[in-house]
């Protein structure tokens, strides 16, 4: 049996001004993030995985089933919360609990009510009364209440205050204590990703540009902040992408120690998701296209190992 909860193999989707082409895997027992700027293709990827958008070419699996023909038996083992999808404004939390119990035989109404209470969410008020943050919390809790094997969450912490965000992340960590569970999550909050996830994929203009573990991001990635003279003489053997920002050249490396040893005195910022997204996304296609190939190969090697 596969150890992957989700796989995509060059799943493509073409819109008028946008083309998605994604290869990725979400292993069981791990939390995988999909990060990227607005419009980079995160929601479209989620929609393909959930069978809501059919790929033009390529393929994908969710819990071993073809994403273009997901049986209800598989859908019942999945919990999802997409930012765009909301429950009908006129229904109360109590109504939605009853509706969910019809489709999900394993739906645990007691667990759901308990979590809603813990997060201060009423079950007797219509969804139309919920704030953005309340609706985000509600969607995530309802998605978890039938004890799915995989959770697919599109920006679950968007609009949440710092306390609610911490609670929600704790809830997701508790969910992962059950062996075999996995999460695919997107977020624009770098702290959430870095504190919660095991690894991440960076998507840029519909293509996966990078796949890395959070541990390696923390240990080995850095941004070199260079003057023009330093940039001109830079040894680029471990540079993934570079871009001019704020009057300096920002060069992203996955071999921080190499540059610490070989370029003493150069300003080096330790790796963080925000810095990585900014440099990778802003770097021109011509600059990072050759690197993308190297990254694809590295990703493939890791996938095979
Ligand atoms: N049904 C559609 N028809 C045409 N274009 C679409 C459709 N759905 C998405 N797109 C386009 O695909 C691109 C990717 O959109 P998507 O919603 O996947 O990005 P995202 O990374 O989730 O963005 P955000 O972070 O803002 O939520 C955008 O340019 C969007 O306009």
Image (cartoon, rainbow, N blue to C red):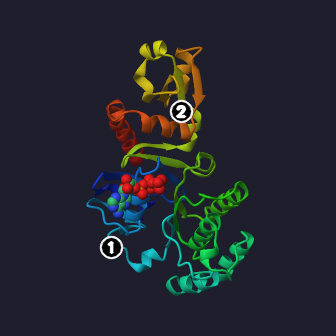
Numbered label tally? 2
**Between discs 1 and 2, the one toward the N terminus:** 1
Near mark 2 (Cα within 10 A), the count class, few <14, some 14-19 or many ≥20, is many
Drawn side of residue 181 relative to residue 119, left or right: left
Q: Position of residue 258 (x, y in %)?
A: 52, 22
Drawn side of residue 129 relative to residue 249, left or right: right
What's the mark number on residue 116?
none
Give the residue at mark 1: 69
Query: Which residue is outermost to the front?
Result: 129
Q: CA distance from mark 1 to mark 2?
A: 40 Å
Q: Quadrant of the C terminus?
A: top left
Near mark 1 (Cα within 10 A), the count class, few <14, some 14-19 or many ≥20, is few
Q: Does residue 168 appear in this view?
A: yes
The residue sitting at 59% across, 74% down in the picture is: 142
The residue sitting at 38% across, 77% down in the picture is: 71
Q: Is residue 55 above or below residue 270?
A: below
Q: Position of residue 81 (x, y in %)?
A: 52, 67
The quarter of the picture where residue 111 lies is bottom right
Seen from the viewer's position, the closer of residues 94 and 178 is 94
Q: Is residue 81 above or below residue 192?
A: below
Kindly state the secondary structure of the residue where label 1 is placed. Answer: loop
The residue sitting at 37% across, 33% down in the picture is: 284
Seen from the viewer's position, the closer of residues 209 and 89 is 89
Q: Is residue 302 above or below residue 288?
A: below
Give the residue at mark 2: 221
Seen from the viewer's position, the closer of residues 79 and 213 is 79
Q: Does residue 42 appear in this view?
A: no
């Amino acid at each position: 049996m596969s150890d992957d909860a989700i796989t995509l193999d060059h799943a493509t989707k073409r819109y008028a001004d946008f083309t998605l082409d994604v290869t990725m895997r979400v292993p069981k027992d791990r939390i995988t993030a999909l990060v990227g700027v607005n419009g980079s293709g995160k929601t479209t990827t989620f929609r393909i995985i959930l069978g809501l958008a059919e790929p033009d070419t390529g393929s994908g699996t969710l819990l071993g089933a073809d994403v273009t023909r997901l049986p209800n038996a598989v859908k019942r083992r999945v919990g999802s919360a997409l930012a765009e999808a909301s429950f009908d404004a006129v229904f109360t939390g109590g109504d939605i609990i009853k509706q969910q119990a019809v489709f999900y035989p394993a739906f645990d109404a007691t667990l759901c009510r308990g979590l809603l209470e813990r997060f201060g969410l009423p079950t007797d008020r219509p969804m139309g009364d919920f704030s953005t943050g309340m609706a985000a919390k509600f969607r995530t809790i309802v998605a978890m209440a039938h004890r799915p094997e995989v959770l697919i969450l599109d920006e679950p912490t968007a609009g949440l205050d710092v306390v609610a965000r911490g609670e929600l992340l704790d809830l997701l960590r508790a969910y992962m204590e059950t062996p075999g569970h996995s999460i695919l999550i997107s977020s624009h909050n770098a702290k959430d990703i870095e504190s919660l996830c095991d690894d991440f994929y960076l998507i840029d203009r519909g293509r996966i540009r990078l796949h890395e573990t959070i541990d390696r991001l923390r240990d080995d990635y850095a941004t070199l902040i260079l003057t023009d003279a330093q940039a001109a003489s830079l040894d680029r053997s471990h540079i993934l992408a570079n871009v001019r920002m704020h009057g300096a050249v920002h060069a992203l490396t996955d071999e921080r120690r190499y540059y610490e040893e070989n370029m003493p005195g150069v300003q080096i910022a330790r790796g963080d998701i925000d810095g990585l997204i900014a440099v990778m996304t802003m770097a021109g296609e011509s600059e990072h296209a050759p690197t993308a190939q190297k990254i694809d190969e590295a990703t493939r090697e890791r996938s095979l190992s």
